[in-house]
């Protein structure tokens, strides 16, 4: 198969997936706020996406190994497309929650399949670059998505329909791809739930440290988008300035994502992770003393994005370095699970800290989390895991 065509279609799919997620979060929040839904119920509704990811995760690997990448991408895509188109049919809190749950499941199928396919076809010396491009396209889509909320001024149904149509057009290009299946490990039965659990154990044993950066990024993204606006407003920062500060983190990520991926190919994933985590931890520690200074926070968010904004993609690349190809689907699955755990737990912990502790404590918490991940990576015995991956591959 033409790898350029394959790579182009896969990153386009993840870009549209980012667009749909980036549109859905603020759109439903705005609609519910207009309708007088409480902020707590609004926040609860937003977790539907991540709950869908967690519910579907243990069930994803078996069909991927049995059917291949293409069928799972097609299934995930059509689930998102139909669910998105169903929002205007019936405006109900719980009906929309179910649709959001289904979109979480469908999006996870897309991410899991495309992510695993890209890590499988990428040679080690280009893996960081390829995964960073993958992350970049998702980030671009996620950044553009909120702009579609402006379509509410025309019609409440229009943003859902436009996103559904764009997703459908991109989904059709998947039919151009030739299906492939992940590499197999005959030592463990691959198409059953029990086999998935056994492989979870293997990945957790040999590459657990690579799962921490995606979880850390999940916490960061959710806290900065969900908790920081509350903290900023309580600190007296103008709401218009808040709307500028938050995207600065994403802007920093877009600037540095590919350069950091290329550097990780050249100097090693572990070294780059240690550098960005130490820098990110220091920046958030400094931000803890600047909670009432808008320009100071803007600079901190931009700098933090340039460093730790790529921890998800670097974590995936690191995981792929540590594991044999036969375990890549399981590793990618666990990266998604850990990201979701971070996305759900981050705002909950952040909310408690804002409620009961001093204003800078939220940033001190983020600094401590990044420092903890840094210590874990620094103390990890990489040689043992790498030897395991090498020996498993040479047995084929």
Image (cartoon, grey):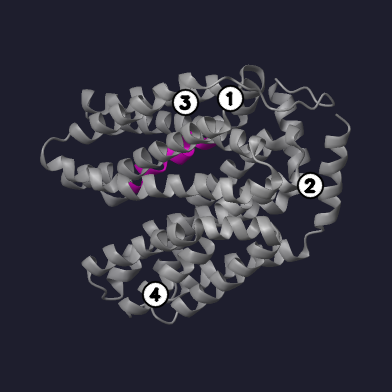
Image position of 187 (left or right of 184): right
Whole-angstrom CA distance, mark 2 to mark 3, is 29 Å
Residue 109, x across and y down, in percent: 52, 30
Residue 161, x across and y down, in percent: 24, 29
Residue at image location 22% in from the left, 66% down from the top:
240
Whole-angstrom CA distance, mark 2 to mark 4, is 37 Å
Query: Which disc is residue 390 wearing?
Result: none
- Marks 1/3 in contact by CB < 8 Å: the verdict is no
The residue labelled by disc 4 is 299
Q: What stretch of residues is rendered in magenta? A: 42-54
- Marks 2/1 in contact by CB < 8 Å: the verdict is no
Whole-angstrom CA distance, mark 4 to mark 1, is 41 Å
Q: Going from the N terminus, do you reach mark 2 or mark 3 first?
A: 3
Q: Residues within 10 Å of mark 3 (few under 14, many from 20)?
A: many
Q: Residues within 10 Å of mark 1 (few under 14, many from 20)?
A: many
Q: Going from the N terminus, do you reach mark 2 or mark 4 first?
A: 2
Image position of 289 (left or right of 43): right
Residue 75 in view here: no
The residue labelled by disc 3 is 76
Above or below for 24 versus 176: below
């Amino acid at each position: 198969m033409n790898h350029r065509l394959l790579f182009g279609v896969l990153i386009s799919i993840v870009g549209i997936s980012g667009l749909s997620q980036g549109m859905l979060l603020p759109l439903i929040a705005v609609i519910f706020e207009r309708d007088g839904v409480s902020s707590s119920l609004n926040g609860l509704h937003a977790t539907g996406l991540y709950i869908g990811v967690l519910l579907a995760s243990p069930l994803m690997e078996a069909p991927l190994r049995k059917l291949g990448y293409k069928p799972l991408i097609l299934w995930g895509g059509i689930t998102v497309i139909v669910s998105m188109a169903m929002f205007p049919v019936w405006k109900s809190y719980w009906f929309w929650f179910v649709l959001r749950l289904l979109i979480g499941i469908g999006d996870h199928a897309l991410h899991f399949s495309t992510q695993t396919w890209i890590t499988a076809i990428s040679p080690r010396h280009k893996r960081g670059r390829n995964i960073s491009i993958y992350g970049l396209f998702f980030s671009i889509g996620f950044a553009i998505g909120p702009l579609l909320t402006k379509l509410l001024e025309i019609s409440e149904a229009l943003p859902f329909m436009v996103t559904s149509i764009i997703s459908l057009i991109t989904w059709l290009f998947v039919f151009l791809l030739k299906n492939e299946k992940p590499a197999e490990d005959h030592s463990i039965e691959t198409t059953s739930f029990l086999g998935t659990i056994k492989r979870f154990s293997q990945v957790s044993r040999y590459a657990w440290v690579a799962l921490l950066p995606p979880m850390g990024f999940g916490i960061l993204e959710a806290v900065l988008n969900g908790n920081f606006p509350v903290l900023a407003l309580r600190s007296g920062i103008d709401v218009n300035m808040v709307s500028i500060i938050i995207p600065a983190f994403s802007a920093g990520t877009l600037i540095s994502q590919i350069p950091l991926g290329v550097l990780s190919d050249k100097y090693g994933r572990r070294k780059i992770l240690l550098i960005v985590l130490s820098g990110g931890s220091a920046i958030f520690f400094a931000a803890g003393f600047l909670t009432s200074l808008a320009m100071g926070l803007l600079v901190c968010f931009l700098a933090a994005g340039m460093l730790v904004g790529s921890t998800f993609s670097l974590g995936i690349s690191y995981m792929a370095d540590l594991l044999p190809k036969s375990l890549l689907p399981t590793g990618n699955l666990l990266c998604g699970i850990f990201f979701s755990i971070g996305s759900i737990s981050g705002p909950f912990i952040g909310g408690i800290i804002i409620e009961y502790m001093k204003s800078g404590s939220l940033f001190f918490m983020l600094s401590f989390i990044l420092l903890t991940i840094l210590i874990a990576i620094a103390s990890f015995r990489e040689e043992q895991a790498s030897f395991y991956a090498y020996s498993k591959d040479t047995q084929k």
